[in-house]
Each structure stands twice: as structure tokens, then as C-alpha cells.
Amino acid sequence: EDTSHSEDDVQETKKSCWDCLPCYRPYAGDTTKLREIVVNAPYSQDPELLSRHQFMDNYVATTRYRWWNFIFKNLYEQFQKAANFYFLIMAIITSIPGVSTIPVYATVTPLAFVLAVTAIKDGIDDYKRYKNDRELNNRTVEVLVPGGDTQVLKWDQLQVGHVVKVKQDTNFPADLILLSSSEENGECGIQTANLDGETNLKIRQALKETVSLSPEHIAKVGSMTVKCERPHPQLYGFEGQLFMDDAHYALNPSHMLLRGAMLKETKFVYALVIYTGNQTKVMLNNDPPRFKQSHMDKVMNKQLYLIFILQFCIVFTCTVLSGWFYVNRAGKHWYFRIEDTSVAAGTQDAVTNFFAFYVLLSVMVPISLIVSMELVRLGQAVLINVDNRMYDSEDGKLAAARSTTLSEELGQIQYIFSDKTGTLTSNQMAFEKCSIAGVMYGGTEKDTIGVNDSKRNKSGGDGSFDLKSQHKDGLLTEADRSHEHDGIITPHHLHGRHRDSDEMTGDRQHSRATRIPDMSTIDVDGDPRFCNMSDPALLFKLLEGDEAARSYVLALALCHTVSAVTDITRPGKVIYQGESTDEIALVTMASFHGVRFVSRERDVVTLVLPWVTQEGQQQHNDSKGAAASGGPGHRRSNTMGSRVQFKILQIMAFSSDRKRMAVIVQYPDGSIRVLIKGADDVMERRASKDPQVNSPDMWKTTHSHLFQFSREGLRVMLVGERVLDAKSYQEWSKRYAEASESFADKGDSRQEKMDRIAGEIEKDFKVLGVTAIEDKLQDGVPLTLKLLKKAGIKIWVLTGDKQNTAVNIGKSCGLIGWDYQLEYLRATTPEDVMKELKTIKQHLELSDKQGAALMVTGASLEVGLEDKTQELLFEVMNHPIVRVVVASRMSPKQKARVVTLVKTKLHVVTLAVGDGANDVSMIRAAHVGVGIRGKEGMQAANSSDYAISKFRFLTQLLLVHGTLSYNRNAILILYFFYKNIMMAVQQIYFVFVCGYSSEEVFDGYMLNTFNLCWTALPILLFSVFDRPANVDELLEFPQLYLSGLHGDLFNFRTFWISFFEAVVHGSVVWLMTWYTAHDMFDSYWVSSVATYTVVVLVANTKMAMITTTWFWFNALIIILTVLVYFGFIYLYCGPIGFSFSPWLFGVIQQVMARPMFYLVALWLCISVFLQDYLVYYVQRIFNPTLLMLVQECRNDTSKKQDLIYALNNKSARRKSTTTYTKAPNAHTHGALLTPNGGRNNPGNTGMMGAKYPQHEAKLKMLAT
């Protein structure tokens, strides 16, 4: 075997300066453009072959660290965070001798704690990954050795070139090329649930040239060689060639078995290893959790920058005062022992104090907040994971929080971008109607399967029809009974032998009024859930020999990739499995009308037809003979019709780019036909323009039916047929085969070449008809959309479906109001798009409607997103009365681009939700990505931040978890800064009484334990468990979500209000403890401990005031925190702490011995309590928020109903003609939208306003 490289194959890899290191040196087998794999090369004795046949081993490692680089790499990653780097600088400054009076441990300890906690968390996560890797790498598989025997190897010992024997119900250990299987035709079934979540059976096919090879021949070194592309992450993309016996054969994805997939319905397979380890496609697609920063983090960072500026101003002022004091006053104080008071000495002292002041005031930035936020978000993620309200009984799964950094982001969503199919709908396809040659079936009178079930059951429940039961019911004439032994029903059986030809060609209603077929006569395969249409008129056309009807139904039964699998619940019947539920619905529809797809063997498809054909009659007679002879294994069949085989010459698979699928079939009569189905817009462009082929009348009625089906929200496709002569097919087939065996070049890839050549034959066809499939709405979608819209969230639908279909689905689910003004953007040129946008804008400005919906096509949007029209497009999309945008015929890239542009142009928080692989780009582009585990697989869920099973769970995720997480985390941040600023105020005041020196006001250990011990647990429990409103209230009043949507609880205003509140409280604490009670303290450290104790008590009092939901454990924690503190301070100021801080020995005893201390501490705590209580009281009386009103109604059903009525009373809503702004005085939870600058509506506010006049003005605003 000549395995040398051709000049075209060789492409030297780019040299790197790291190539001298073994760990960076490329593998010898990957230094060329194409990878060349020799069968069983690892067992070769040829040194030259072994030297160039070097590839990555099959060891898989998904860990982020190794044991030797964990510490260094983890520290490097942590110091990428600004806060950690800031405190590292502070620690370095503290460690410089003579710069700071604060001990090094005072700044190093909290930093070390933060780093250690994060490192432990990262280490635990990485160890879990390591254990999973170890389990996978230690699995075993059988490998063929030269001679045909097998040996067992671990997965991590596999090498490229090994031939493995994989048995049923086991996973594939690497990426493989199928060589042969236990099936005679070389097929095998696989399940790719581990790759994309799809549980349906998929068929893979070995080359017919390798199917019959013995294990001994396969195992021979060099018996075959594979040339293929180098590893890449395209999951279902592969180009290669197999060389054997001086011939070569094309390899494509249908020959490939991917690592992680499982072998099903096949005893064993032999396969060649081509990609191993981290070069397998599943590993190349392994997407680690992405870091996304929440909007709240960004707001906090902006406030931190302002604090840094403020901190610098304070430090600079203290530095100047320190230098001034040193030069002008220090010499007058003998205890300073300063001899040189020159300006130079003062400057030197001031520079030293500058860094010391920075260290002293570093407490203004709470480093423990970072760890606390991580822990709180982790707790909130756990609550999402265990929420039974998001449990789906169908798949048995709860919601999954795949990201732990975005919990509060769920409470600030302003725009939702949703897919339609599988997201709003259930992706449970059911064939509803069809149009054949301009005639509609299933549209006027449905004879559903359920109606005829009772008659079918007479046959024994297997779905076939018993002629004897029909004879008993009097449905067959005497003439019909003569054919009873045949088991074949002709049109004369079902319609009467004496019906004349004029009656047969009568209109639809007349044929129904006459003797019509009983659909119970059909022997049905497949799952009835996939077809709701069972039209006797169509069966009559088939039995009568109508060419259009037969061609249409045959096209549905042949143009697919579905496989027929034995139904174990119904002996003798099959069920259909395939990658597309649309195809299953089409094949099931054909089966329900007598054209049954019963088997597929390599390139032969077997159908059972309800009419007798010349080709099927011989087989039918043979089966009768077998029955008469009582042949072994024979089972009497009531199948009506002929068993006919069709040869599949070529399959051009569906793709999102082509939007169509075609098969070339050789019919039993020898004719060759191209059967094609696809999106109506693509198919119409490619159909024959010859009026003799597709008549104008046919197009007119077909367009009418397309429009009608779309209005009903049905998914539509066109079906066509083209007849080829043998010579044209042979010429085309040769060129297509050459393209299928080619490799990618500078021009096109193999797939692009194949698509281009396929397009040459997928045109000029005759349109057979239209399919209309229903994709049912998911349960709870209308209510979910209603609640989300009430919460103030704008919803855009981005779908690949037809525009009319998307619009009618939007109306049926309540997304588009029936009274909405509909505006359409359909132009495809920049000039026309600009013109239409200006017209639409003018319509919106003059509209008197309360809402409008904008309909955009993908082609129009592509033009609209250009620079010239982009600004106007977003102005129209974001118009105040545009509540919904529906974009149809969207590609995955267009979806992602729209989300990205909305996110960046409008500066809003976005959420994208979808269920398919085509939604992954959109999900990753949004701030928050939600994946729905659906019938299209798990790719969307695996790429998301949150995974749910049903769209309706969005209400629980956003309105409940999002609202609560936002409230909790906003208060968490404000409280952390509150208590730290209050602590920093003590240090700032102390500077002015200690000669502007850099002396610390508190002991170093006391500073460290303040955030870590005495104020930590209460706020952590609060941030995980506090509920200002319960779950039912949050769903009953979705307007509560608006507080997070507008960012009312955490913004510039609320942050600095809390900041100045901390300054005031800190100032009062300082004045009370250092000046009012200074006479009773005879030591600086006594005053320090007293002040520190009061700050701890005030901080915990504040914590108690902001708590809205009291559990036994959070009350116990606050009490225990205070008690444990006093125990600690007694021990620390006693013999135990003497070795650490001898200057504190006996201090606490002096503090506790003074009654005045208790009065001061009590007075300060009561002052904080009264201040907060007074603010809340005044607000509840004069300006109550919606949350306050909801809390007041909690135990009063009458009040609650009145409040709901006031909020939902449409008579209190004023039609908006301008813009919407935030209502005045609508801060915190009550911020709602009100038109025209926030002026209140004087209209009726309902009974609540009459009962409670003090709330009337507020209710008017809330109703607005």
C-alpha cells in the first residue's frame, strides 16, 4: 500500500519558537494538511511508519489545573480581579517597615481568606472533573490485533489507527469510522443523547466495500488507509477518503461514530479510530462555563471608582495636614521627640503617611463582599436547582443553574428574545392538512383516527382491519366478498361497484355525501400522535388512481431519512424514528392513508401501497402461496395492497442553508425521479416556470392554501417532483460523486461543492402540493407571556418560520394582541427599507392604538442592520407603543446579531431563550441565556446559563427567583458598604485627634474579625432566604418585577444615600463614644474597644431592621453573633490575647464596668431603629410602594382583590401618544411606567381608592 504523501497533501505547520520544547512540539501525524491513518499502524514493525504515525493519545483531561500548577495558576486568575489586586497592593504597602502602623496580618489575613476560599472552591470543582476524567479514561474496549484476535485496552491507551470492537449499549471511546457491523448491510443504530440530547435512533452506514471483510483482513496492518481532514469542532462535518485495493471511496458524516454516542439495536461494530482524546469532536466542542458579569456588578464597579476618587481625596487631605502638623505643631509636643521640623523632613513624613493612610482607609472597600457575593449566588443557584415549581414530569428534571454569577440579573431583564418552534410551541408535530394540485384535504371535515378506533379494535387491536367484521357490519357487498380471500381492497369495495365516472369526478362535498371509504380499512403504522388528518377523500383519490394524489403521498413516503423499527407493543407493526419530527409526521400521514413505509435496507425502501400494482402483485401472490403452504414463521396478514420496493439512488440531506431536502428514486417501472421538499419561499423560486407544468390556476389556489395554513399557525412546506432520463442522471451522478470524494480547497468545501451540484437538479420541478403541520403551543405559554408583559418586559420572537405562521402563533398565544396595530417590513433593498421604515414610524406616531407589533423578515432585517438604516430601524423597533417584534425567516447568525445590537445600542439587559442548536449563538450573545430541554436536543441547554424544561417556567425563574435575588443582592451590597463606611468614619475622625498621624483606631485583629465574624452570617442568611413577598404574591403582582427592571434598589442614588447614612451613623457613634463619654475612659484603647463594640451592635441592629422575613434561624444567628462577640472580646482582652495585643489586656473589663457605656450603646441602637422605623412609616403613609401595598393585603383577601382590580382596571389606563417615563416618587419596588412625563391619570382607580383615600393618588399612578 502506497501511503506516501502527495505534494498537494503536504502543508508544513507554522514553526514556533516553542517547538523545541516537547510539550509544545506538534505531533508528526498532524504536520500535514490532511491526516493519514493506516489501519493497525500501532502494531506495525516499520520504524518509518511509526515515526510519522504519531498522534495525540486518547487520554482526556477536562480539568483546569494540574497538581504542579494549581497554586500559581489560581492566584494568577484571582488577581485579575481589580479588588483582589487592590488589596494585594495594600498588603505590600503594609509590609514595608515604617510605612504603616497597622500590622501586616491586618491586611494580609482578609486577603488570604478570600483567596483561600476561592481556591478551595475552584479546587473542589476541579477535583470533581478529575474524578470524572479518571472514570472515563479507565473504561475498557476490545481492540483487533493482527490475526483477528482481540485484546482489552483502557480508553486512554487507544491510539489512532486501532480497530475497535464496540458492543451494544456501550459508548464509543473515540471518533471512529464504521467498517462493518453485525448487520448484513453494515448499518448500525446510535443514540447521541450525550452529544446533543436527542434520544431518537440514528442510522450510520459502513461502506459497502468494507461490510463483508473478515476481522482477520481488517486487522492486517496497512489493509486500508484513511485520509481525512485534521480535527475541527464541527460536530456533524467530516470529509475523508478510504483507500483499499488501488481504489478510493468517499467518507462522510454518515460513516462516522462520535465519542460519547452509544451503540443501539446492533450487537457489535468494527470501527477505525481516527480522532482521539482532546481532538475528538465532543471535546473540541466542550464549552466551559463562561464568565458573564452582571449589570449589578458593573454598577458596583462604577461606584467603586467614585469611592477610589473619594478615598484619594481624603488621603491627600490627611497627607497635607500631616505634613503641615509635622512642620508647625509637632515640635511643640515633647512626647513626639521630633528634633528636625524642616519642610524636607515634613515632606518625607507626609509621603510615608500617604501610603499609611491608604492602608488605614482600605476598609472603605469591603474585600469580604466578593466572597459573600459568591456564596450568596451559589445559595441562590441551589434554590433554583431544587425549586419543585420548575419540575417537569415529562422529562423528570428540575431547572438547572449552570451559571452562579447571574442570579440578580434574572431580576433586571428588559428584553426577551425567544425562538418559536420548540420554545413557545411544544415541537410535537402533527400533520393537520394538505393541499394537492390545488385541492385541500383535511380542511373541511376531519375524520380523526380516534373516531375509527373502535372499528380497528375489532381486528384484535393491532391496527389492521378484519374483513369478517366488515362483512358482519354489512359494509361489504356480495361482490366484495369474493375478494375476501385476497385481503385486497379496491375502489369498488369502498365506493360501490355501480358508481359512475361523473359521480367520481364530482366536487368535494358531493363525494363526501356519497359512499366514502371507511378509514378503518387502513393498516396503520407509526404513532397516531404525529397525524391528526385521516381524510377518506384522499384515500378515494389514491384508490381511483389519481396521479397527483399518488405522486404526492409517494413523495412523503420516500423523501425522508426516517427508519422503521419494530413496534414491540404491536406485533407486525413498525414505528418511525428519525432526526426530524417533521419527517416522522409526513411519513405517518402517508401511512394513515394506506402508503406504508415498512423497511429501509441500505439503498432500498419498501412501501406497502393501498392499490394493486404490477410490481407488487407477484410478491403478493408469493405471500399467499407461502401462507397456503404454512411456511415457517408465516403470519397471516390483513395488509391491503401491494408490497413494492423503490431504489434510493441519492439523498441530498436537509440543511439550514439549503432549506430543502431531495432524494433521487428509481421507481419499480424504471423511471428516475427527483422528490424534493422544503421551505415554500425557496421551493417557489426553484419550481418550473412552465405553465404546462405548474399552471397559474394551481399557483393561485396553492398560494391561497399557503396563506390559510399560515394564518392558522401551521408549518408549511412545498413538495415537488421532477422526472429525469437515465443519461441526464448518469452525467449528474458522476459529477456529484466527484464532489463527494473531493477535499476542501481554496475555493469551496466538499459540502459547498455538493450543494452547488445538487442545486442543478433541484429545480424546474412540478409542484405536487403543500404540507401543513401543527406545532402545538406549550402548556401555560399564553399566561406566561401575559405575566411577563405585565412585568414590563418587551418580548421579541426570532424564528426561521414563515411570517404568517409566526404572526398567527403570536396571536394565538396572546403575545400579539388582537387589537394591536400590525406593521410589516418586507422590503429587500436599502432604499425601499428606508422608505418603509419612515412610513411605519409615521403610522406609529399617528396611531391611537395602545400597542403595536412590528413584523420583520430576515431579508429585510439583513438590509436594515446596515449602517445607513440601522439607526432608524432601532428607533422604530424601540418605539413606545411597539410592544412586540416578530422577525421571521431568521438565520442563527442574524438572531445573534440582533441580540448583540439591541444589547449594545439600547444598553438594556437581555435574555435569549431557545431549544435548538440554531439558538445557541443567540443564547450566548445575550446577557442571560436560557436553554429549553426540547426535542431538538440539548445543545441549547448545554450552552445556556439556565436550563429549564418548559417555557412557562420563565415566570418562576424571572418573577420569583429574579425579583428575590435582585432585592437580596442589592441590599447585600448596600449593607456591606454601610457597615464598612461606618467603620472607616471612625478612622477618619481619629486622624484629627491624633495629630494627623497614621495611627490606627482599632486593633488589627479586631478589624479583620469585623467583616469575617461579627457581621457576616446574618447578611448571608438574609441574602439567601429573605422574602419581602411570597411566591404567590410575586406571581399575582408581576408589576413587582419593575423594581429590578428599572434598577430602583441599587443605583447611583440608592448607593450614595446608603453611603451618607453610614457617614451620619458613624459620626453619631464617634461623637457619643469619644466626646460625650470621654471622661469615663482613661485610655485610648478603652475608647477604641468601646467604639468598636458599639459599631458591631449598631450594624446588627441595622441588619434586623432590613430583614422582612423572620425565621427562627436568622433571629438566632443575630443573637448568637452578638453573644459570641462579647465572649470573644473578653478572651481577646484577657490572657489569651495578651501575646497578640498586650495593649488590650483588661480593657473590656473597664468598658463593661461603666453603666454609661450601656446607656450609650442602647441609645445608639434605638436611634438607628427609630430612624429606619420613621422613614418606613412616613413612606407607607404618604408614598407607599407597590410592595408595601402588597404586604398590607397579605392577610386580607378583600384588600388584595381591590388592589388587583386597581392595577388591572383598563378604564384607569390612558392611551399613550408620546413616550413612557418612570413615574415620580416611584422608587424602590413601586416604580412603574406612566405616560407623558409621569403625570398621574385622573381616571377611576377602583374600589381600593375609595376604601383607602390616602392611597388614591398612589393607586392612580400604579394603575397607569
Image: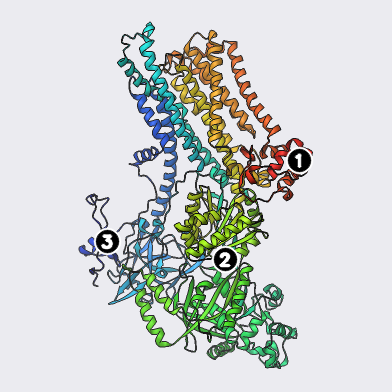
Count neighbours of disc 1 (C-alpha within 10 A) and say few if under 14, some if 14 to 19, many if 20 or more: some
Count neighbours of disc 3 (C-alpha within 10 A) and say few if under 14, some if 14 to 19, many if 20 or more: many
Residue type at mark 3: give it: Gly
Image x and y of residue 176, in percent = 38, 65
Image x and y of residue 452, in percent = 70, 76
Q: Is residue 798 visible?
A: no
How far is disc 1 from disc 2 in space, using C-alphas? 45 Å
Give the answer, above or below, for where 892 lies relative to 750: above
Image x and y of residue 782, in percent = 65, 57
Dot label at residue 29: 3
Dot label at residue 803: 2
Q: Which circle's residue, 1 or 2, is located before the other in the chain?
A: 2
Residue at disc 2, secondary structure: helix
Residue type at mark 2: give it: Gln
Image x and y of residue 441, in percent = 64, 78
Q: Which circle's residue, 2 or 3, is located before the other in the chain?
A: 3
User: 969 or 895, which is in the foreground?
Assistant: 895
How far is disc 3 from disc 1 in space, using C-alphas? 80 Å
Q: Residue at x 21, y 65 (%)?
A: 46
Q: Residue at x 59, y 48 (%)?
A: 957
**The N terminus lies in quadrant:** bottom left
Left or right: 685 in relation to 1155: left
Dot label at residue 570: none
Left or right: 677 in relation to 479: left
